[in-house]
Amino acid sequence: MKNLIVDAVPDSPYYPEINFNAENGVCKLSGESYMEEAYKFYTPLLNWLKEYTLERKNPVTLNLKLTYFNTNSSRLLLDILDVLKKSQEAGTNVAINWYYEEDDPDVKDEVEDFEIETGLKITMKPME
């Protein structure tokens, strides 16, 4: 299985940087995510994650470093978390870290909503 890497494009801030590492199970999304047709961007990520969690029982760590995401992206992030929840229920060790800007007043509520929706524990960490 290959790594899934999508580099950030400075002239197009709508798409986050992606680095899903097949060797160590560390998956990172960072930047901003507010494209119109989010499903087109996120479908390969979902497929990669489904394949990875089915093929391997190695631990998975999801590091979210999103400074902004729109409603469409939020729905697809929830789908990613659902894949991880199913994998966790099947015995995979799953860790989710949500890095946030300390001056962002809404992020805590958003993360709590994701936790309620999925039943996953999400660890919040300030951005470095």
Image (spheres, rainbow, N blue to C red):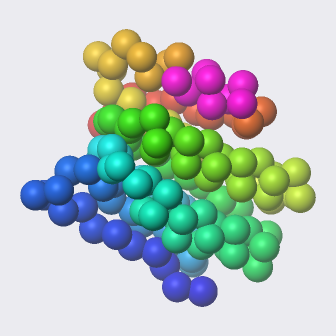
Residue 112 falls within the magenta-colored stretch: yes
Image quadrant where residue 28 sits: bottom left
Residue 20 falls within the magenta-colored stretch: no
Residue 24 seen anywhere in this rendered image of the structure: no
Query: Which quarter of the figure is the C terminus placed in?
Result: top left
Image quadrant where residue 116 sits: top right
Q: Which residue lies furthest to the bottom in this view?
A: 1
Q: Residue at x 38, y 38 (%)?
A: 69
Query: Which quarter of the figure is the N terminus placed in?
Result: bottom right
Query: Position of 11 compared to 94: left or right?
Result: left
Q: Nearer the viewer, residue 15 or 87?
A: 15
Where is residue 17 drawn, in percent x and y?
33, 59
Residue 106 seen anywhere in this rendered image of the structure: yes
Residue extent of the magenta highlight: 110-117
Q: Which residue is drawn at 17% across and 56% down?
A: 12
Query: Position of 77 compared to 68: left or right?
Result: right
Where is residue 109 drawn, in percent x and y?
53, 17
Q: Residue furthest front?
A: 36
Image quadrant where residue 9 sits: bottom left
Q: Residue at x 33, y 50 (%)?
A: 35
Q: Nearer the viewer, residue 29 or 13?
A: 13
For the image, the number of numbered tags is 0
Q: Residue furthest right?
A: 90
Where is residue 19 drawn, in percent x and y?
42, 66
